[in-house]
Image (spheres, grey):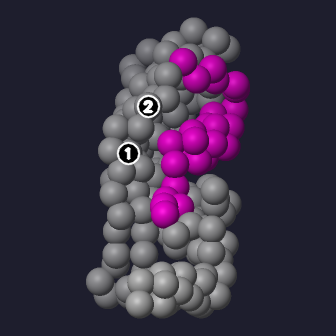
Amino acid sequence: MRGAFITLVVAAALASLSVTPANAYCMFGCDPTEAHARQIFENLLKQRFDKPGKILEFKQTMSERLEMHATGEKGFEIFFNARVEFPEGANLECKPDDAGAVPEGCSSGKHYVTAPRSVDPKGKQYVAPGATVTFDEEYRFYEDPKGWKGPDGNVYSE
């Protein structure tokens, strides 16, 4: 009897693998990781700032699974803090004038983000040469047949 039960459990596990081939290797957790979030951060940092930054610190602070009730779409969020040094500065054309006004297309906001949402600063942000910028962000991933689609448009899997 015990042998039949074990056979049944193994057969059920194998059957579930064939039903969801994209998740076949993810039975025990294929959520996005801190490493995925850091890779996205590196990708978006290069897009958002025109000069290279040196990541001094990157630390995941929280994560959570999501399900959008209206659509049934599954998601995952990773919250993190990062500190980046810009030896040459960045977006120097956005430096405020003596009165504090920024050129058109630039933002005077001091809340730095790599994946802006509707509430975040619009436009490029000036970073003074040698400054260190702190980021306190979250990235939302959406379930994709091949893994998780990140805010940089790439799909990540284990």
Q: Which mark is residue 99?
A: none
Instruction: Give whichever of 52, 57 is nearer the camera.
Output: 57
Q: Which structural element holds mark 2?
A: strand
Where does label 2 land, which residue?
59
- State the residue at coordinates (41%, 50%): 78
Left or right: 101, with 127 as reference point: left
In the picture, measured across the screen, residue 132 lies left or right of residue 63, that is right
Image spot of residue 120 (x, y percent)? 38, 48
> Front-most of 110 and 17?
17
Q: Quadrant of residue 156?
A: bottom right
Q: Is residue 146 above or below residue 63?
A: below
Marks 2/1: CA–CA distance: 9 Å
- Please name the residue shown 42% across and 75% down the image: 74
Amino acid carrying mark 2 in the image:
Lys
- Of the image marks 2 and 1, the number of the one nearer the N terminus: 2
Q: Report the number of discs.
A: 2
The stretch in magenta equals 28-56
Q: Is residue 39 magenta?
A: yes
Query: Is residue 136 located in the magenta-colored stretch of the structure?
Result: no
Residue 54: percent from the left, percent from the top?
63, 20
Disc sitting over residue 79 in the figure: 1
Q: Which residue does the image show at 41% across and 38% down from the upper left? A: 60
